[in-house]
Every structure is written in structure tokens, then in C-alpha cells.
Image (tube, grey):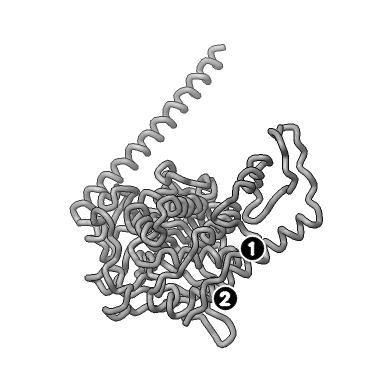
Amino acid sequence: MDPPPPPIPPSLPKEEKTDKTKEAEHSQPHSENGVGETEGSGANTGPVDTSKSRPRRKSEKDKKLKKEDKQNIIKYFNQTINSLVKKKYGKKGFYYPFKSAEIMITLAAVKKILKKEPPMIEMKVPVVIVGDLHGQYSDLIRIFDMFRDDTNPGYLNTRYVFLGDYVDRGRQSLEIIMILFMLKVLYPRQFALLRGNHECRAINKAYGFAAEIRERFLDPKKSLEIFEGFNEVFTHLPLSCLVADSILCMHGGISSKMKTRDDIMKIPKPLKDVSTNPIATDLLWADPMIGLPCDVPNKVRGVSVYFGEETLDNVLNDLNLTMVFRGHQMMMNGFNFYHNKLITVFSAAAYYPDKPNRGAICCIGADGRIGFKVIIPHPPDHPDSQLKMFRGEHDTSNDHDTGYVTVAPQLAAALAHKEEAKKSREERGASGQHDKEEDKEKEKDREKEKE
């Protein structure tokens, strides 16, 4: 029998506040230093003019309390992770009994770290690339178990880059996102957590995450607070990761609008509405298409584009890259190559009830060699093999989600002709502009000769 979940550290905020606590909060400025941090402890009896007040230097007692708070949070995270990886939750599909206060503490701690990360973070090798998980917590535990040894659990033995889409569809989105957020706080340089298109409020509100939170937290106010809290943190997630200065990772795909690496770094964070930034939209939503000579609108998803081999070559050359890793599409074998320069990794096994696909992860060694580990689907009676939570209208992209799409020959020819005509017009325009400049120079020379 599993022990009860560890209690919330006594120095951390409780769920309910007393009248004295509320009164004290109104009588002094709020701190913005993170979870468990306070600036002062003196009570004020009247309104405070914050523009004239001077911050008091922290006393040794304040510093000691802050250190104790941090130690309590670390202890709580380690205890919770040790419980979460047990067979009951990681392999049998039981819900972990999270408390709302514990979740809010975790969100505040991880947000403090993610706020400091740029839109494109960097990671060294060796590293493991993990694709879409979509609430299939047992698959995440199986991935960690692949790297365990007699001394350490698997999550401590290597670096990880997660390509996004942690939530929706599956039963245990909360277990996945909570353990990853805790690991990110404890080991920020070992875990890269990228944003997927399902880490957007409009998507995870419709496809399972919001419903899971409502079912597990029956108080409407608490469930809404938790849902909004997660989505606030999601806006701070980085959009890409540069591995070994040569491999670019993202959830969706590349963007033809990326001409330099700085184009990614200039994407604003936090980014609440991804559609306001074209490059961010492509990084979360774009798909490759075989034989496509230029970008075309992605009518299946209704957002972003399909890109082709030429666009991929141009981006690799412009950004000085050798390869691209992305998720976003289910692959029957768990991974698939595109143009020998892009690899799609999808880690959720048996993602669709009627398509028993394998999951996969990619391992990049210290020498740059690439290998794969495959995740076999669970037996039919396992919770993750049951129907996924396809809430609301069925996502039309699922009907086509069997691998890369190949462009029709007639469309490819028409697009190629259109692209050639466009380049010809640009060349003629550049040539015409050059001729006009030459004529102006000749006219100036003739005027000088007359003088």
C-alpha cells in the first residue's frame, strides 16, 4: 500500500486564508520574488505610499526563512516524484491525489525558471528527444525506465528535450505535466520543455485537459484557477531548442520566414496568442509535405503551412544547421525521416484506438550518433489503451494522421510553374531597376559634359 502523499511544507501558503492574513496582505505591498518569499513582516495601519517607501534590507532572519522555504519545496518535490514513479500511478493508471495548493506552488516555482529562458534554448549531447505524450503517463514512466540503473532512476541519468503536447487526449495529463515541471525546477539544465500546440488555451480547453481538471477538482473556482494557472505558465515555455549548436528541435515545423537564428530569439515571451507571430505559429503547427516545391496553406489543420524539401534545405543553410527534430504527427513506427534531414518523433504508443502505433524516442550520443528506442503499445485492457478523451468535435486532422502527406503530381507541377514565374518576375524587376539606375547615371554624365 502506498503511503499518503507528503504534506504541504508548513512554511508554504495554505489554501484557505484567515481574516488576519487577508488584513495583513492589504496592509503591505505584495512580493513578486517567487513562492515562499517575503520582503518584510511589519504590519501597517494605514495606506502605504509605495512610491516614497524604501525597500528594507533583508535581515538574516528573512534570509534564513527564504532558505528554509526553498529547502522545503525541494524536499516536497523529491517526495512527490518518488511517489509518482511508483507502479500504482505510473503503470496501473491511478490518479495521484494532487492538492490545489500543491499545484499552485509548483506552477509558481517553474514559472520563475521559464521566465528566464529565451524562445530558443540550448542543450548539450548526449540527449534524449521525446515526442508527443498526450496524457499517456505510463509511456513517460517507461521512457524513464529505459535509462535507469542500479543507482539512479532514469530521469537522473541523461538530458531530455521534450517536444511538447504533454496534455490532452490521454487520462493522466496532470501527472505528466506536474512531474516534468517538478523535474524542471530541480534540474533546470537537464530538462528542456518546449511548447506544443496543445499548450495553448483554446486547444487544451477543447481536447481533454480542462475536462480532466474539472473531473479531479470538483470545486469550480479551484478547477478554473488551476486551468488558468497552467495556461499562464505555458505562455512562458520556449518554442525551440538548439542541440549541439547544429540540430534544431521544435514541436510543429520550420518556417520559411526564419532567415537567421535571431529571428527565433526575437519572438516575444510570454506569448499568449501564438497566431500573432507567424514564425511561432509555424514552429507549433507546420507540417512537411513530400514533393512540395513551396509553402502552401495547411488546410487540414486550418492554421500555418505545409513546407517542402526546398524550404527545409534553405532553412538549414540559412541557420547553419544539419538536422531538424519535430513532433506533432503520429507515426506508425514512432518516428520517420523526411528528406534525410528532418525526423518526426512521436512517443505516445497506441495513440488512436483504431491505430495501434508504436511510440519512440531518439537518443543522440556524445559523438553525434543517432539511435531510436521503440515503445510497444500496451495490451487492450490497459487504461492507456482505452478510448482517448476526444472532447467536442472530432479533430479532422486525425483522419489524415498516418504519416507524411505526398503532394499530388498535378499540384506539384502547378506550384512549381507558379514559383518559377514568381522568381522570373523578381529577376525582371531587379534587372529593370538596375537598368533605370544605369540610365540615371548616363544622364548625369551627359549633363556634366555639357557643362
- The total number of labels drawn is 2
The amino acid beneath tag 1 is: Pro
Kindly tell me whether residue 422 is visible in this rendering.
yes
Rendering coords of residue 225 (x, y %): 46, 51
Return the disc, 1 or 2, that comes first in the chain's sequence: 1
Q: Considering the image in quadrants, where does the C terminus appear? A: top right
Rendering coords of residue 204 (x, y %): 37, 54
Nearer to us in this view, 403 or 74: 74
The amino acid beneath tag 2 is: Leu
Kindly tell me whether residue 133 is visible in this rendering.
no
| Occupied quadrant, residue 91 | bottom left
- Disc 2 is placed on an element classified as helix
Q: Which residue is drawn at 60% across and 54% down?
A: 112
Rendering coords of residue 46 (x, y %): 70, 34
Nearer to us in this view, 161 or 231: 231
Q: Name the residue under label 1.
A: 10
Asked if 45 appears above or below 130 in the picture, the reply is above
| Occupied quadrant, residue 366 | bottom right
Query: How far apart are the two marked residues, 1 and 2, measured between alpha carbons?
Result: 28 Å
Nearer to us in this view, 161 or 110: 110
Left or right relative to 356: residue 57? right
Q: Please report contact status of discs 1 and 2: CB closer than 8 Å, yes or no.
A: no
Asked if 81 appears above or below 120 in the picture, the reply is below
Q: How crowded is mark 1: few (under 14 residues within 10 Å), some or many (20 or more)?
A: few
Left or right relative to 245: residue 354? left
Nearer to us in this view, 26 or 87: 26
Q: Mark 2 points at which residue?
A: 156
Rendering coords of residue 333 (x, y %): 32, 74
Which residue lies most toward the bottom here?
150
